[in-house]
Every structure is written in structure tokens, then in C-alpha cells.
Image: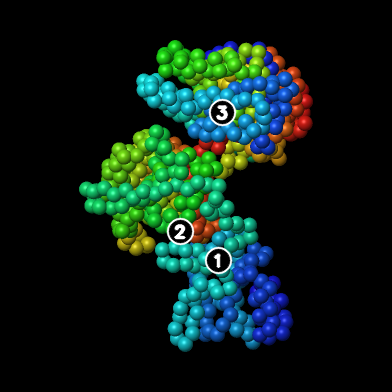
């Protein structure tokens, strides 16, 4: 994988928000017998990535090595102006594409709403709903592909890992991870996190070490990152595909904090979302949820699942 | 007569009974889709003065026979918010007062009005200072303007301001009033802290001659576009692109925002227009609103004749109790016909600062969605 530098050989645990103090992270590490040093990637916290005291406290005697990807990226952009300018231009392009994708999603949704109120027989309306799902799936796939092409084109042009400004950090990161028993991937701003993971190929040296990720960190490890919130301050919002994740955890779309962000009485919306994401399972990661992956496959866990009937199934186990 | 007044009327009507009635309720009385205004005192006549377009603006309160209690009941749909005063006529004199039985006041540049809330209306929580929301800072920006000479602009810098980052720029018309009467300072702090809008720089501009300069005045467009924005882009880390520039204004300020964008199509990618004074005529140029509106009518007629996509996203709001609701409603299909992304919100409110305050969260977060969608802690 471009962003991660190879998939994991060890176990991966995905968790929900850690508002209660990272006890679930400590428990996951304990379960894999991790007692020593652990690496922490908290680039999703952006400028606050150094504020890791709560994680350190929760992990007790285990030493936490903060890999400081955000700080490192700031250093890279300060030293390597050429790369910084190209990177900023890439991000602007991706932002525009995300905005236009969003305009097109709204248009499909408006069309769906206009058709759904017509007084015709139910079978035809159901058929039309399927047309909407197909349109959304096509648009999602097209957007994800185009975003990947932009990212791959950027890599091909700039070969970031080979640039002196990045390569030194990359070597340092691999050495730091080599000295750790496990890697933690914190939540936060999912775009910031993904971009730093890509820039440094930060997970390249993980090998067989357990990886424990929560919220945005969990999203980053799946095949497809989906942004969602049913009650934004501006009213209506349609879930959007952001692009590909690292793909370490297959067959799932993870939804941190689902209880707060998804309107659970909106059966039609849930049903459409599940069909849109199929065959991936749509799994909510709320506090207490946990998904264990081995070799990319979900092997056990407990989460909230959205089902095609438009329902929310709590306490679902694979 | 309202249920509450009917009950009172059926009783003894003694001073004690009136006192007990006043003590037992909050005023005005809101019940069953109605509002009952009450005033107690000696007067020749008592009138309700309000700013609800669609109802007679001055209405007489009736005296409850045998008492000095005056009352008037009007319909009040759910979620309404209305501002009013009482006009007391006594000894041949009349004076306007706030409702002494109602502690709720709404302030504006002319003073303060009493304010009543219909069932279901709640004052938004995000307008108040929140200890969890770090406060932005303000700087005074002053430069020699070729257009207007020396003029000050107050510039808001977000709490997390860093010179190394680049920020969107929001330009506010009647900026001092937005700060004073629409709580825009705490609102910006709160929405940014909650990541509902991105951190941004906000230029609070004000005009000493707003009825002239905001009424499609070419000098105003030049001042903002050729002087203020370039100055801010030179001295502050502002993102110099249309998607990151927004004009906000209410009433004549909304006309100024729309006409400035119209004069410089493509320069301002975001517009937030509140209760715009978008007066127009369908035939002829006769304007019933007065001479101050003449240049507005000329501009609006021209814009309506050939609307074009002058911006990218436009958020428009208006109160249904304003006379301008007709002009605003009829503008929406024209804006949409250009291909611009348009959102229109109506509220059961009047032409006032608290109406504009209450729409800011939706408007700003729609024009500038914050990182909340990207953040999963």
C-alpha cells in the first residue's frame, strides 16, 4: 500500500472514541501481551499532537513514543518549499473535487426526493430508489478513483519518500517503530492523519506488531473513508466518500460515534446508505465497540451494525 | 379574549385579584397559538406598537371593565419571535414604553424593544459566551483609502490564529452593529471552537453614510474590492481566492453585499444576505419606499432583468413578518436560475438584529463548512 508501505502481519484492533480515558486501548494492548514501549501516531490532533498525557497515564508503565508526524510534516514543509507548494496545490485540487462531488451528491438526492413524492405504484418507486442507489455508487466510485489518481500522480511526480527532507524522517520513524512492541493510531482530523501517514509511509515498518486504532485512526485503516453526520449545523448532509484508506481492514466501513452522528429513526436513509456501501458492512464504533482483524479479515468483535432494512443492530458480533 | 383574561374577568376584579393574576403568570401570555399583551395603569388609551408585517401596526388594548388592566390578544404561530412596545396615551400626550411586565429586551441602534417568544422558540445556546470557546482577538486596521479617506475596520483574528496558516476572509457590513446587537463575536468563537466553521479572519466594516454607500454605490465596491481586501491580503495570511471570500450584510448591508459582488463577478465566492432591502418594480421605476431606495430599485431591476452567477454559494434569510419577505422570496428563483448554489431560510421574525443573529449559525456553516465532518475524536 502506498500510504502504509505494506499491510500488517500482526493483529489490528479498531475502537471507537476514547472519551473515557483510553482504558479500552490499554485493555487491547494487555490482551496482546504488550507491556513495553508503544509508538503513538496522533497526527489527527494536528497542532495538539504533543498533548498525549492522558494516553500515557492510561497506559501505565508502558513507555509511549510519540512519533510526532504533524510536527515532522511542518518541518518538511518549512525546509522543502518546492514540495510544500506542490502539496498545497494538490490539497486545493482535492478540496475542490470534494466540493464538486458534494454538489453532484446533492443533485442526485434532490432528484430522488422529487421522484419519491410522485403518486405512482410502489413497485415503480422502489425501482426508482434502486436507480438512486446505483447513481450514488457510481459517483462514489468515480470520486474515489479520481482522488486516488491525483494522489498517485503526485507521488509519481514528487517521489516524496526519496526526497532528502522526507527520507531522513522516514528512516527515523522506522527505527522508532522497530523499538516498539505495538503502534497506536489516535483519532482526530482524518484528512490530516491520512496525509501525514502518506507523506512518511509511517506504518511501513509495523510488521507483526499489534496496531490499535480508534475513531479517525480506525477509519484510516479501512479500504474506504466515509464522512458522515446526519445533523450538521447547516441542516441536511449526505455522507461522502473521502477516498481510500490504507486498506488494512477489509470489508467494512467504520463509523465512529455513530450514536451521535446518525439519525437512527431515518430508516430510509440508513437503508440507502447500507446499499450504497455494500458489500462492505457499515459498523458503528461507539464507546465500548471493538473490531479485531487478522490478515485483513474481521475475526471477532462487537459493534453497532446498520442493516439494509434501515435498522440499527446494537451488540452485533461477526 | 384569551382564556387567561376570561378567567380573570369571571372573578371579583378587585385590586387583590389583579395583583394575584400578575404574580401568577409571565407576560405576555402565550397560550394556544395566541399571545395576550397586558398593561396595568391609568391611561386614556393604550396601544400595541409592533413590527409584524401583515398585522395592523398599531392596535388598541381593551380595558377590563372595573379595573386598570388593559389587554389585547393576537394570533402567534409557533416559533415566532416578535418585538413590540406599548404606546400610552394620557392627558393628551403619548409616549412609547417597553413592557414593564416583560423582562426580555432586544437591543438595536435605536434603543431596545420588548420581545415575546411564541411556543417552541428558544434563544440559541451558541450565541452566549462559552468558557470552553477560546476568544478571538481584535485589531484595528486603518489605511489611507483613496475612495473614502481614512476609515477604520475592526479585524477579528481567531483564537488559534497562526501566521503560518491561511484563512478565509469574511467581510461584514454594519460590523459594529453585528458585534453589538447580533452577538457575532461570541458566535464566531463558539462556531470555531466547535469546528462548525473553519477558523477565519473577519473584517467588521461600518459606514457613516450607509444609506448612500450601501445602496449600490460604486465607491463602496471599489473600497472593499480594490482597497480593503488587497490590504488585508498583503498584511494578513488570507486565502486569496473566491471560495475563501464572503460578504455578509443585513437590510441595506445585504444590498451592498449583492451589488458589490455583482460589480466584481467571481471575486466573492460566498454571500450571506439577511433581510435584504431588495426593492424592485415590475413596471416603471416608481418606488413606494422612499428616495433612499431609488438606487436600490435601479440596481435590483437591472440584476433581475439579467441575473448571472456572480458568486458560487449564496445564503439568503428573511423574516416572514417583514415587508421585505416578498422581495426576498422572489429573488430566490432568479439566483437559482444562474446555477449558483442557493439556500433560503425563512423565520417567523421581523426586520431586526436578533432575527439575523439566529440565522448566522446555519448561514456561516453552510457557506464555510467547518472541519467537524472531518474530525472523529
Q: Which residue is mark 3?
A: A42
Quarter assignment of residue A108: top right
* Label 1 residue SS: loop
* Label 2 residue SS: helix
Image quadrant holding the N terminus of chain A, namely top right
Image point (48%, 55%), residue name: B183
Q: Which residue is mark 2?
A: B181
* Number of numbered labels in the structure image: 3
Q: Which residue is mark 1?
A: B104
Mark sitting earlier along the chain (2/1): 1
- The span from disc 1 to disc 3 (Cα, nearest Å) is 47 Å
Name the spot of residue B280 as percent of width and height, x first: 38, 54
Q: How many residues crowd around disc 3 within 10 Å: few (fewer than 14), some, or many (20 or more)?
A: many
User: Which mark, by number, is residue B214?
Assistant: none
Name the spot of residue A122 as percent of width and height, x first: 71, 33
Image quadrant holding the C terminus of chain A, namely top right
Dot 1: chain letter? B
Horizontally, residue B7 falls left or right of residue A100, namely right
- The span from disc 2 to disc 1 (Cα, nearest Å) is 14 Å
Q: Nearer the viewer, mark 2 or mark 3?
A: 3
Amino acid at each position: 500500500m502506498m500510504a502504509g508501505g505494506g499491510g500488517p502481519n500482526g493483529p489490528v484492533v479498531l475502537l471507537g472514541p476514547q472519551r473515557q480515558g483510553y482504558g479500552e486501548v490499554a485493555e487491547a494492548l494487555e490482551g496482546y501481551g504488550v507491556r513495553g514501549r508503544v509508538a503513538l501516531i496522533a497526527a489527527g490532533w494536528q497542532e495538539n499532537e504533543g498533548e498525549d498525557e492522558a494516553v500515557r497515564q492510561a497506559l501505565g508503565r508502558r513507555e509511549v513514543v510519540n512519533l510526532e508526524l504533524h510536527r515532522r510534516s511542518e518541518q518538511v514543509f518549512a525546509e522543502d518549499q518546492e514540495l510544500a507548494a506542490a502539496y498545497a496545490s494538490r490539497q486545493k485540487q482535492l478540496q475542490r473535487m470534494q466540493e464538486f462531488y458534494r454538489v453532484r451528491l446533492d443533485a442526485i438526492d434532490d432528484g430522488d426526493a422529487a421522484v419519491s413524492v410522485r403518486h405512482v405504484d410502489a413497485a415503480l418507486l422502489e425501482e426508482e430508489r434502486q436507480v438512486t442507489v446505483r447513481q450514488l455508487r457510481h459517483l462514489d466510485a468515480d470520486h474515489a478513483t479520481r482522488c486516488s489518481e491525483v494522489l498517485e500522480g503526485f507521488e509519481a511526480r514528487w517521489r516524496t519518500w526519496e526526497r532528502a527532507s522526507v527520507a531522513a524522517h522516514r528512516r527515523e520513524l522506522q527505527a522508532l517503530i522497530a523499538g516498539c512492541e505495538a503502534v497506536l493510531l489516535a483519532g482526530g482530523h482524518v484528512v490530516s492523519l491520512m496525509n501525514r501517514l502518506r507523506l512518511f509511509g509511517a506504518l511501513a515498518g509495523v510488521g507483526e506488531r499489534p496496531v490499535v486504532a480508534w475513531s479517525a485512526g480506525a477509519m484510516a485503516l479501512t479500504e474506504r473513508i466515509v464522512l458522515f453526520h446526519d445533523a450538521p449545523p447547516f441542516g441536511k448532509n449526505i455522507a461522502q466518500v473521502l477516498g481510500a484508506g490504507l486498506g488494512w481492514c477489509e470489508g467494512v466501513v467504520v463509523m465512529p460515534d455513530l450514536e451521535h452522528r446518525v439519525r437512527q429513526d431515518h430508516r430510509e436513509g440508513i437503508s440507502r446508505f447500507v446499499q450504497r456501501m455494500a458489500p462492505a458492512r457499515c459498523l458503528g464504533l461507539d464507546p465500548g465497540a471493538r473490531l479485531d482483524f487478522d490478515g485483513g479479515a474481521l475475526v471477532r468483535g462487537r459493534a453497532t451494525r446498520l442493516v439494509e432494512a434501515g435498522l440499527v443492530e446494537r451488540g452485533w458480533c461477526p | 379574549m384569551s382564556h387567561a383574561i376570561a378567567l380573570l374577568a369571571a372573578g371579583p376584579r378587585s385590586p387583590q385579584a389583579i395583583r394575584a393574576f400578575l404574580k401568577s403568570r409571565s407576560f405576555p401570555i402565550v397560550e394556544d397559538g395566541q399571545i395576550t399583551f397586558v398593561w396595568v395603569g391609568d391611561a386614556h388609551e393604550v396601544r400595541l406598537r409592533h413590527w409584524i408585517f401583515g398585522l395592523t401596526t398599531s392596535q388598541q388594548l381593551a380595558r377590563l371593565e372595573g379595573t386598570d388592566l388593559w389587554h389585547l390578544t393576537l394570533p402567534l404561530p409557533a416559533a415566532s419571535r416578535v418585538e413590540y412596545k406599548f404606546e400610552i396615551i394620557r392627558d393628551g400626550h403619548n409616549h412609547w414604553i417597553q413592557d414593564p411586565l416583560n423582562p426580555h429586551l432586544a437591543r438595536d441602534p435605536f434603543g431596545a424593544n420588548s420581545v415575546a417568544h411564541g411556543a417552541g422558540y428558544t434563544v440559541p445556546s451558541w450565541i452566549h459566551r462559552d468558557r470552553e470557546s477560546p476568544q478571538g482577538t481584535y485589531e484595528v486596521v486603518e489605511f489611507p483609502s483613496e475612495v473614502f479617506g481614512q476609515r477604520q475596520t475592526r479585524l477579528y483574528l481567531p483564537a488559534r490564529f497562526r501566521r503560518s496558516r491561511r484563512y478565509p476572509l469574511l467581510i461584514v457590513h454594519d460590523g459594529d452593529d453585528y458585534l453589538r446587537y447580533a452577538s457575532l463575536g461570541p458566535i464566531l468563537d463558539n462556531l470555531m471552537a466547535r469546528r462548525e466553521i473553519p477558523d477565519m479572519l473577519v473584517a467588521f466594516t461600518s459606514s457613516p453614510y450607509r444609506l448612500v454607500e450601501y445602496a449600490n454605490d460604486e465607491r463602496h465596491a471599489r473600497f472593499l474590492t480594490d482597497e480593503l481586501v488587497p490590504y488585508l491580503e498583503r498584511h494578513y495570511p488570507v486565502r486569496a481566492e473566491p471560495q475563501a471570500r464572503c460578504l455578509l450584510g443585513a437590510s441595506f448591508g445585504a444590498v451592498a453585499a449583492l451589488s458589490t459582488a455583482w460589480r466584481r463577478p467571481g471575486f466573492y465566492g460566498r454571500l450571506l444576505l439577511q433581510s435584504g432591502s431588495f426593492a424592485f418594480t415590475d413596471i416603471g421605476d416608481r418606488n413606494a419606499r422612499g428616495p433612499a431606495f431609488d438606487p436600490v430599485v435601479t440596481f435590483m431591476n437591472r440584476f433581475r432583468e439579467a441575473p448571472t452567477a456572480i458568486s458560487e454559494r449564496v445564503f439568503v434569510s428573511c423574516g416572514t413578518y417583514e415587508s421585505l419577505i416578498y422581495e426576498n422570496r422572489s429573488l430566490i428563483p432568479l439566483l437559482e436560475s444562474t446555477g449558483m448554489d442557493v439556500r433560503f431560510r425563512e423565520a417567523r421574525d421581523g426586520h431586526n438584529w436578533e432575527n439575523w443573529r439566529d440565522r448566522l449559525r446555519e448561514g456561516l456553516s453552510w457557506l464555510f463548512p467547518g472541519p467537524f465532518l472531518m474530525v472523529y475524536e
